[in-house]
Amino acid sequence: MTPFLDVPFLPEETYVEFINGNSDCIDSVHFSLMGAKRLDNRIDPLSIDNLDTIIRMMEQVRIKNKYLLLNSLFYGPDLLTKNEHLAHLIDCLEKCVNAGVVKGIIYCDQFLLQSLSVEAPELAKSLEAVPGTNTMLDSRAKISSHLAYISETNFQLPSKITLDRSLNRNFENLTDTVNWCRQAYPEIRIELLANEGCLPFCPYRNSHDAYIALGNHEGADNSFHINNTLGCRQLLDKQPYRLLQSPFIRPEDVDSYLSQADLILLSGRAQGLDFLKKTVSAYIARSHEGNLLELLDSMNWLGNHLYIENSALSFDFANMLSVCDNRCNSCGFCIELFKAIARPLNHGKKEPLAAATM
């Protein structure tokens, strides 16, 4: 089998065994420096904050392609202006490179990329610079521009790029973009994000990630409260049928996308070990019997009180939603489909969904 998954890494011995046991399906893993100086985009206060331990566990992973996440939307000025802070990051990167556990970095902040290139040019030359998902590569111009900007640094061009998830349900633009990439950059593989699960063209996304980055810098992340009361969470509470509009790729749909793309990216490090094992297993099997929300990163929280019967979705579900114009009041398709396949959960039991909750 050709490896096709790009999966998150967690520093858990049982997860290392799980990844190695499925290495014939996994092309790459992405990991973070965890709590080290708040360099991670998603800080877990329980994470291992020991670089030697992380390196030791990454050395055990029998996957060739390993990428370090430095994908905060922005970093505090201290990292770019105070030598001791940047020196710490460079030291961590050098240790990872010397141990052979990192092929490249995944970034969003071009200032950080430029700073590393200037202060550690030889180190940068040994690493790929891979644009993170929040660079939203959704057009020829954006892709070529980002690659050109990388070329202005000492970093290597990436061996893969992740197309923005907005293309997942826009098959015409997806096909056009992929075909252009194949011709313009034949050495670069194409990756699609499958299970983030946020709203389509989410109006809160950029600000939400900025609040997360700010919280990481200041050491007090209030983004959960902000999103829960003002962001997409409150919108989904009111209109849960909107989750069907999210451009996720179900496990059952993987093969149709692999006819164009090379890799399927999975997210969900913050959801923990059980979530990752279940999700990776489902995408390897190309099937999931149960609650669709169990596999979606951003909407996983809804699974505590809502059950979406994944098997009830049609084989051509993605095709049907590809013509969505987000005019729910005049269409009603997602509302009716939601009524047919969704049930509220009460202490783990599935019950009929009341029409009033629609």
Image (cartoon, helix red, strand yellow):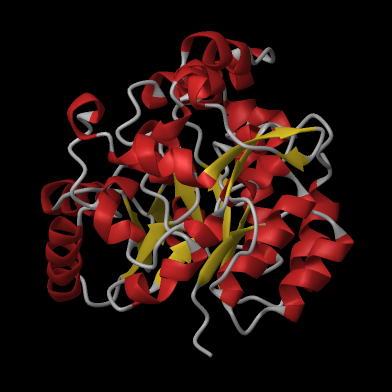
Res 24 visible: yes
- Figure check: 341 above or below 115: below
* Quarter-of-image position of residue 154: bottom left
- Figure check: 168 above or below 209: below
**Viewer-proximal residue among 226 and 214:** 226
Number of marks present in the image shown = 0
* Quarter-of-image position of residue 346: top right
- Figure check: 135 above or below 177: above
Res 158 visible: no
Q: Residue at x 13, y 54 (%)?
A: 140
**Residue 318 shown left or right of residue 286 in the figure:** left
Q: Quadrant of the C terminus?
A: top left
Residue lying at the far bottom of the rendered structure: 1
**Viewer-proximal residue among 111 and 123:** 111
Q: Residue at x 20, y 70 (%)?
A: 185
* Quarter-of-image position of residue 144: bottom left
**Viewer-proximal residue among 271 and 156:** 271
**Viewer-proximal residue among 141 and 225:** 225
- Figure check: 319 above or below 234: below
Q: Residue at x 61, y 33 (%)?
A: 302
Q: Position of residue 336 (x, y in %)?
A: 37, 39
Q: Position of residue 96 (x, y in %)?
A: 67, 58
Q: Position of residue 318 (x, y in %)?
A: 32, 58
**Residue 277 shown left or right of residue 14 in the figure:** left
Q: Residue at x 41, y 38 (%)?
A: 108
**Residue 212 shown left or right of residue 319 in the figure:** right
Q: Position of residue 190 (x, y in %)?
A: 33, 67
